Image (tube, rainbow, N blue to C red):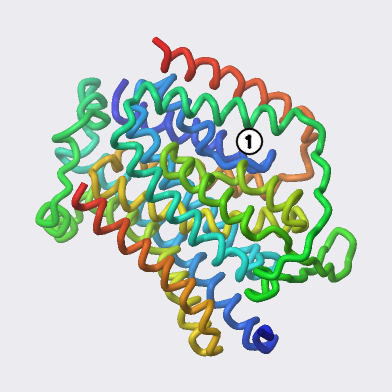
């Protein structure tokens, strides 16, 4: 393969990853890392470093529009960011001590978990509870829900739980080069009582900063190869933009099935690679 | 604690949205331009099949010291331009946090100034420690 061929293939794969990811509400990193390692033989550390760069681009791009539409709960985002960024630093450091085989196996685990979250029935919302911390930090919010055409007020519960889960999501992000929304969003929605649109918007808002922290570590360590990271960032970003534009025009059920199959196959492959 | 006056709050959101949009767009333009340059330049991506192994391999392929970076930028070296784009992309959320810290300071919201400064400090640590590691 020539450098041109490699660049075009990576661009193509990343574009599809960004497109599919945005259509089913998952970041592109979760497909890019398996594709780079399994199909193109890039080392998992370099693939993770390239992926985390693309995560900054897509989440910041999405966050820009969510913030201007006033859907993001910025105060909540900033509070939970303390945990995700601390987690990202932990994860980026763990990535040095952990061997490649463990990265493959941990990644497989997160892929299997993602498949499970996509297949399971929608979870039940846990009853809201008084939360003095949320009161003190003025985390409760409201947003205009376009689908029903009215302002929706909501109260935030269980901030401490959200903080703990955000830390774990940050570790996963820094260690594996993914956004970590898959871990945060269900907890924010079901346990903290936040409307799903606000969860997605606020999660994206946090992911940019989270990914920046670990990307800085990877960049300074020389793991970010311009040759790999550039087409990944461009491809995922363009794919995600296309996804946002065509959303609703495509039957999402079919895409979900394709996505679940791709993730499950990747998960099995990554696991095998780790065990071998 | 009462929340900030609505109109002021609105301004912050527009500023932050703009910072994110401009940062991401500019860095993607730099990354694209750098990639194109790399294909055109000698010593860039022009080589044959053996090149991919070198460019994706460990060590040697990507000099990461400051002298290489600055010199590369002066000569419009493709990979140096990509690195500039990557740095700008990483800096974008950091600038967003700094802007929010300023906004909270102007609202005299001490708790949130502290929270945003902690995030900024952690980001500073990531750059410093990454360099040492």
Residue A187 position, x and y percent, is 68, 48
- Label 1 environment density (alpha carbons within 10 Å; few <14, some 14–19, many ≥20): many
Q: Chain of mark 1?
A: A
Q: Regarding mark 1 in the picture, which secondary structure is present there? A: helix
Residue identified by numbered label 1: A20
At 45% from the left edge and 36% from the top edge, which residue is drawn? A11
At 58% from the left edge and 55% from the top edge, which residue is drawn? A204
At 54% from the left edge and 21% from the top edge, which residue is drawn? A266
Viewport quadrant of the C terminus of chain A: top left
Residue B32 appears left or right of B55:
right
- Please identify the residue farthest to the top as the structure is shown: A276
Viewport quadrant of the N terminus of chain A: top left
Judge whether A52 appears above or below A59 on screen: above
Q: Is residue B66 visible?
A: yes
Judge whether B98 appears above or below A11 on screen: below
Q: Quadrant of residue A133?
A: bottom right
Residue B2 position, x and y percent, is 68, 86
At 15% from the left edge and 44% from the top edge, which residue is drawn? B63
């Amino acid at each position: 393969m020539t450098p041109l061929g490699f660049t075009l293939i990576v661009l193509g794969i990343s574009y599809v990853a960004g497109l599919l990811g945005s259509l089913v509400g998952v970041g592109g990193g979760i497909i890019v890392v398996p594709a780079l390692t399994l199909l193109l033989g890039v080392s998992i550390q370099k693939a993770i470093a390239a992926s985390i760069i693309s995560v900054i681009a897509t989440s910041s791009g999405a966050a820009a529009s969510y913030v201007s539409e006033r859907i993001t709960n910025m105060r909540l985002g900033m509070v939970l960011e303390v945990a995700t960024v601390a987690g990202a630093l932990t994860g980026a450091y763990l990535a040095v001590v952990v061997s490649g085989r463990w990265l493959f196996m941990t990644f497989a685990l997160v892929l299997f978990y993602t498949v499970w979250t996509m297949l399971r029935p929608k979870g039940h919302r846990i009853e809201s509870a008084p939360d003095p911390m949320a009161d003190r930090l003025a985390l409760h919010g409201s947003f205009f829900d376009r689908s029903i055409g009215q302002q929706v007020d909501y109260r935030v519960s269980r901030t401490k739980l959200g903080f703990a889960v955000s830390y774990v999501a940050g570790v996963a992000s820094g260690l594996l080069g993914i956004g970590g929304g898959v871990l945060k969003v269900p907890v924010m929605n079901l346990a903290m009582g936040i409307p799903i649109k606000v969860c997605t918007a606020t999660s994206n808002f946090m992911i940019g900063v989270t990914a920046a922290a670990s990307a800085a570590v990877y960049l300074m360590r020389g793991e970010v190869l311009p040759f790999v990271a550039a087409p990944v960032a461009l491809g995922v970003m363009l794919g995600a933009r296309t996804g946002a534009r065509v959303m609703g025009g495509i039957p999402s059920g079919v895409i979900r099935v394709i996505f679940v199959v791709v993730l499950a196959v990747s998960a099995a492959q990554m696991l095998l690679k780790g065990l071998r | 604690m009462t929340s900030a006056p609505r109109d002021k709050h609105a301004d912050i959101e527009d500023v932050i949205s703009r910072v994110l949009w401009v940062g991401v767009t500019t860095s993607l333009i730099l990354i694209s331009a750098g990639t194109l340059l790399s294909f055109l330049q000698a010593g860039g991506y022009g080589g044959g099949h053996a090149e991919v192994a070198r460019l994706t391999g460990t060590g040697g392929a990507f000099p990461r010291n400051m002298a290489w970076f600055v010199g590369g930028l002066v000569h419009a070296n493709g990979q140096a331009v990509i690195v500039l784009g990557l740095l700008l992309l990483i800096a974008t959320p950091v600038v967003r946090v700094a802007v929010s810290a300023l906004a909270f300071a102007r609202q005299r919201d001490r708790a949130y100034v502290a929270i945003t400064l902690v995030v900024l400090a952690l980001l500073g640590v990531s750059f410093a420690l990454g360099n040492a590691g």
